[in-house]
Every structure is written in C-alpha cells, then in structure tokens.
Image (spheres, rainbow, N blue to C red):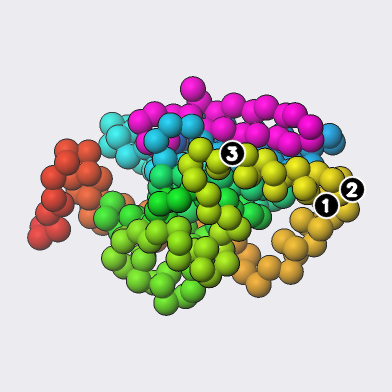
Amino acid sequence: MGITVDVQDGIAEVVMDNPPVNALTVAGWFDLAEKVTAAGRRPEVGALVLRAEGKGFNAGVDIKEMQTTEGFDALIGANRGCFAAFRAVYECEVPVIAAVHDFCLGGGIGLVGNADIIVAAEGTRFGLPEVNQGALGAATHLARLVPQHRMREMVYTADPIDVSLLAAWGSVSRVVPRAELRDAAMEVAARICEKSRLVIRRAKESLNGIDPVDVNRSYRFEQGFTFELNLSGVSDEARDAFVEKRDADFSK
C-alpha cells in the first residue's frame, strides 16, 4: 500500500494504493510529489503513467485526518501537499499519462487536470465536491478538462459528470473497459518512449511554456479562499458533517 514506483522499458509507473478510496493524507500528497518528480528526472524514463489500485483513482484529501488534527496544521499541510503534487505532475520532465477509474474527485482533478494525457475506464466519474466540504480549489485544473460554463456548474453544484462527456470534448484520449485500463495507458506511454528522450523533454517544457494560464499561481489563488472559509467556521461544520455522515447545518 501507499505510493509505489516501478520503471520498466523506459516507462515509470507511479501507483497510488490508499484504501478505502485513495484519499491521501498530508504526508501522502508530499510523497506523491516527491516520487513523481524523482521518476521524471531519471534519464532512462521517457514517460510516466499515474494510476491507482483499489476503489477509485483519487478522492482528494483525507477529511478525517483534517478533523482529528488540532489547529490549522492539517489544513495548511493539505494545501501545500496538494500544491506540491499537482505541480509535480505538471512540471514532471516527461509526459504524464493518467489512468483513471471509478471516480476522480477533488484532489484527483488536480492531478488529472495537470497530466498530459488521460485514459479512463468506462463509467468513471469526474467531479469537484469541494463546496460540500466548505472548500474551494482545483477549478484551475477542471477548466483544463471541461468548457468554462460546465466547469462553473460543476463547482457550484458539486455534481460529477461521466467520462463520456470528457471524451466527447476531447479531454480524454481513450475510454476502455476497466480490465484494459493499465494496458491502454502503457501503450500510449510506450509510443512516446519510441521518441528521443531529449526531444520529448523539450516538447514538454515548451508546451508548458505556452500555456495561457499559470496553473501554479492560479491554484494558489483558489487556496486562499479555502483558508478564508475555514477561518469563518463554515468549513469545520461541513467537514464534521461529512465525517459524521449527516447533513451540514449552515444556519448558525
């Protein structure tokens, strides 16, 4: 369990395995950032596949850890950890192929939105439930996956959408049966690995350089509002309700 890395035939495979739903602790986000960055720096690596075992690709931050930690340490840690992990995917020296199954929520959107190529299993759902937990964030990355007005609707309602919509918009490269997901991602990675390592690394760097939005700065801007909401008290009530499996009371 945890986060593992395996390199074969020029492909680095980074796997998240954190039951029950692959929500990551503060330490888990930083660990993911370090492993993605280190794998991308290995000279023999030409592409990186980011995937998960078990139920779901990623369910975001570990809300239970946040609610059982005194003060703001867990909130600050989650903010910084997510920022580090999302940036690591975006700035990885080689293309990152995200292989997504079941669901991709919250922080998972940050990872996938910053990936270079997305392959997904049939029936996978993508969403940002942040407002339900009194938080904001990763709209920066969702806006790389869906049109602007759908992004706004998804943020306001917290409703997820099916992968078929992302495929229709061209955000997802392939939609395959769950049993074929890893092979499909590895196939894309293998095609990239046929190219010059140097050329592909410069291609990644150049494409990041022409992006119209600075994803790192944009995401940090969003995070400021999450901290503001937390200070207001509304976030604690939302997270407590989530942990206690009840409806949040926002009347106070």
Q: Nearer the viewer, residue 184 or 137?
A: 184
Label 3 SS? helix
Q: Can you identify the residue that label 3 sits on?
A: 182
Q: Could you give the CA–CA distance between mark 3 and mark 1, rounded to whole angstroms?
A: 22 Å
Q: Residues within 10 Å of mark 3 (few under 14, many from 20)?
A: many
Q: Nearer the viewer, residue 179 or 116?
A: 179
Residue 192, percent from left and from top: 78, 49
- Select label 2 or label 3 by which is in front: 3
Label 2 SS? loop
Is residue 10 rendered magenta in the image? yes
Q: Could you give the CA–CA distance between mark 1 and mark 2, rounded to whole angstroms?
A: 6 Å
Outermost residue to the top: 1
Q: Residue at x 22, y 50 (%)?
A: 238
Q: Residue at x 49, y 45 (%)?
A: 177
Q: Quadrant of residue 164?
A: bottom left
Magenta residues, dominant SS class: strand
Q: Which mark is residue 235?
A: none
Q: Residue at x 41, y 45 (%)?
A: 102
Amino acid of disc 3: Arg
In the rendered image, the vertical position of residue 76 relative to residue 223, given as above or below: above
Which segment did they paint magenta? 1-23
Residue 201, percent from left and from top: 82, 50
Q: Can you identify the residue that label 2 sits on?
A: 196
Amino acid of disc 2: Ser
Q: Residues within 10 Å of mark 1 (few under 14, many from 20)?
A: some
